[in-house]
Amino acid sequence: MRVTYKDYSIDIIDDETYTLNSVDNLMTYQLEYFEGEGYEDRFYPTSKHGIRVNQNDKEIRSAIICEIGGATKIHENSFVIKNDSIFICCCDKVYSLGLPDLDLKWIKRFDPATCFGIYEFGNDFIIHGELQISRINKQGELKWDFGARDVFVLHDGSNAFKIKNDIIYLKDWEGYEYILDSNGKEIK
């Protein structure tokens, strides 16, 4: 996926063929982020998201984010670009990287399983996780989270999550519906 921010074009992709510590990768990156490197049982990441920042058709920085946990894919709601940062979901975590240098600002886990999407919400963000919904600020500090009876995914693949007029609408796997206000409190 290619997006434009200021005078940069930014490519964000799933790089499923990337292998850590390999010289045979089809694509290389200047920076590599993977917390599991120090753990023998965590060496093979589930999701690998590549980011390339270009200016005037020339690459100025690249990074790959690798994580273990519930798999994620790049889509229109898997990242947000704001205030010279990219906030991107990868497995059960959200990364904040500076733009254009892609240096790590912070990384935090916001769901026990998977972070499906990140959405602007006032001056903050809402994270749609598999098991919980979280509101965070730009520094990655948790303001509130909400969990329910079951996962926020539906059998038929339809949308279990929606924000409209600062109200959050949710459905869980069992079909229960939840409506949250901006403070994470149930309205219904």
Image (tube, rainbow, N blue to C red):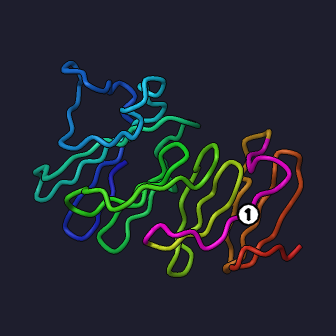
Q: Quadrant of residue 179?
A: bottom right
Along the horizontal axis of the image, is 160 left or right of 188? left
Residue drawn at (59%, 61%), measured in percent from left and top? 127
Residue drawn at (46%, 28%), measured in percent from left and top? 42
78 above or below 33? Answer: below
Quarter of the image with the C terminus in it: bottom right
Q: For mark 1, what is the residue?
A: 146
Between residues 53 and 185, which one lies in front from this camera angle? 185
Q: Quadrant of residue 79?
A: bottom left
Query: Can residue 116 be found in the magenta stretch?
Result: no
Residue drawn at (70%, 58%), measured in percent from left and top? 161
Residue drawn at (41%, 26%), measured in percent from left and top? 43
121 above or below 96? Answer: below
Q: Give the number of callouts.
A: 1
Question: Label 1 amino acid?
Answer: Phe
In x, y percent, where is residue 49? 38, 41
Along the horizontal axis of the image, is 183 left or right of 33? right
Between residues 166 and 21, which one lies in front from this camera angle? 21
The magenta stretch is 139-154
Between residues 62 and 135, which one lies in front from this camera angle? 135
Q: Overall secondary structure of the magenta stretch?
A: loop
In x, y percent, where is residue 46? 49, 31
